[in-house]
Amino acid sequence: MTDYKTIHGKTLLHVASDLDNAQAEGQIWFNTTSTDYKTLVKVAGAWSTGANVGTARANPEGADRSTPSAGLIFGGRTSGSAGGGDTEEYNGTAWSEQNDLNVNRWRGGGAGSQTAALSFGGSTGPTTHVKTCESYDGTNWTEVADLADAHSQNTGGFGLQTAALCVAGYGASFVEQWDGSSWSEVGALNTARGSMALCGSVTAGLVAQGESPSANIDSVEQWDGSSWTEVSDCNTARNQPGGAGISTLSICFGGDPSALTEQWDNTSWTEIADMSTARGRAGAAGTSTAAFCAAGATPGATSGVNNTEEWDYTETRAAGAWASGGTVNTGRHAHSGAGTLTAGVIFGNSVNCELYDGTSWTETGNNSNQRDSGAGAGTQTAALYMGGQGPPGKILDAEHFDGSSWTNGGDLNTGHGVCAGLGLQTAALCASGSESGPPHANVEFYDGSSWTEGADVNSPRREFIGAGIQTAGLVMGGLTGANPYSVMGEVEEYDGSSWTEIADLNTDRKHQCAAGGTSAPTATVLFGGENASSSGLGNTEAWNGTAWTEVADLSTARGAAGGPATSDANEGFYGAGRPNSTASEEWTQALNVKVLTD
């Protein structure tokens, strides 16, 4: 801390407990309890599966190096040695076909953004290299002034539509700069190369790795607006990798043949997380913290692939883990829950209701109606129990809990047995479930006193779970069809007006729990449940808005337990469960706080 104090002074926030995620970002604070200076640091980045491109290809170019959720790829080779003109835009969820380039080509350079891109150079055939330059306005490509020279194959570029560099090419070192109307030669690279990773601007760029006529290259050069300077080499020499970031903070990934990712901090390169699929010759865009790698070719392939991977290095929480919690007083299963890890409540299957304080369970006021397989929502002091089944059949009553006692609320319009719910006591929804026989698709919305039918789910289901709030949530897994039912892994997202199917769970399951809270559409954790044979599951899956990833398992595999309704994905509980267990487990994903020692 000596240097920090010297530079910035000694005015730091003094707190008795560490800051939360929103407060801590970019801050240094003094914890008066532990007497430590602390800050929040990122955990290791990771690649996840994104949407497939419409046209599989090798050697496309990518644009919009600022964000992977507004990306663009164009050109490339689908098979053989002829170039293509296909253009596709990415919104972070799906790729969509746009108008083609005027001149089909591959192995060229690209710059700019999704709505203001530039394509230059490249090859129309194995030995035919062109000077063509085209400008994209978000709809159409228009030919503009040609390059001064036809760069050889596997050139590259970076920058903006109005200010870009076209860098080298196989066996070449010369560089051209675009000023929005014409190209002119500027300082040449120190090492001739093609098939390299590139990023940056016309005043501060980076070129890493690549190939010469005789070998792969591991050297790296930085551009300062007028000349190139060699800096620290990458750890592993490879050709045709992708690049994203700026000249002083970037990543280099993939290559032929490689899945490696290396990170540059303006001093040295560090190997970090690998991609799932080893490949080179891909379209790449983004920053050092959020990027994509789209299409390309796997080692030895003669045609391109269509898969996309997304890079994320924004996580500031350590890996989540399960730990033993307090013992539930009354063993049960097929019940529901509400609240958070340190202020939770479970109810159902028995009329007994129990409160959790993060350490122990305490019995409180009983439910008005004995039921099971209903849905819970709300908080420990304002919970809602809706739907379910019990003598003599499906129950329409909704019950309100105030932290000590239950009262009847408004009745559902349709029986929702083995259903899912989400939201708060005064703003909830009850989705799908079964009235008698196969599940129905009905969804009802609650305002604290009455229920109104709204948009149906796409896939009727029962024995599933929901997470989120009334206007933004997920429903996950469950059973579908008629008896004998089929276990499913389908997930649907609600945006306040309609339901959309998104990525499936990795493991089909029923009778599971989840925590997502207000962030459910972009951050939910789902845990436990049962498979088609009603055997308990212990695996946990985390949703990041794009894909599900397997994380830490429960200590005891089981289903039909109760969990939190309003917790976010960073904490939760899993209480009781089949067969009438009294165990509970606690999920936490703590902030990655670092103690500063110098």
Image: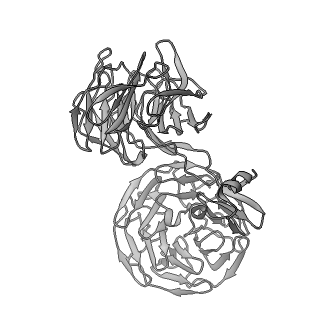
Residue 214 sits above or below residue 159 on the image: above
Q: Is residue 455 left or right of residue 577?
A: left
Examine the image and state in which quarter residue 145 appears.
Answer: top left
Q: Is residue 354 left or right of residue 472?
A: right
- Is any atom of residue 463 visible in this view? no
- Is any atom of residue 99 visible in this view? yes
- Residue at 39% over, 40% down: 52
Measured from the top left, where is residue 102 in percent x and y?
21, 31
Render colour scheme: one colour
Measured from the top left, where is residue 448 in percent x and y?
44, 82
- Residue at 66% over, 77% down: 354
Measured from the top left, where is residue 513 in percent x and y?
56, 62
Residue nearest the observer in this picture, 409 or 58: 58
Measured from the top left, where is residue 320 in percent x and y?
64, 54
- Residue at 77% over, 67% down: 33
Residue 500 sits above or below residue 575 on the image: above
Extreme top residue here?
214
The image quadrant where one finds the N terminus is: bottom right
Residue nearest the observer in this picture, 531 or 80: 80
Residue nearest the observer in this picture, 344 or 198: 198
Q: How many marks?
A: 0
Examine the image and state in which quarter residue 404 appears.
Answer: bottom right
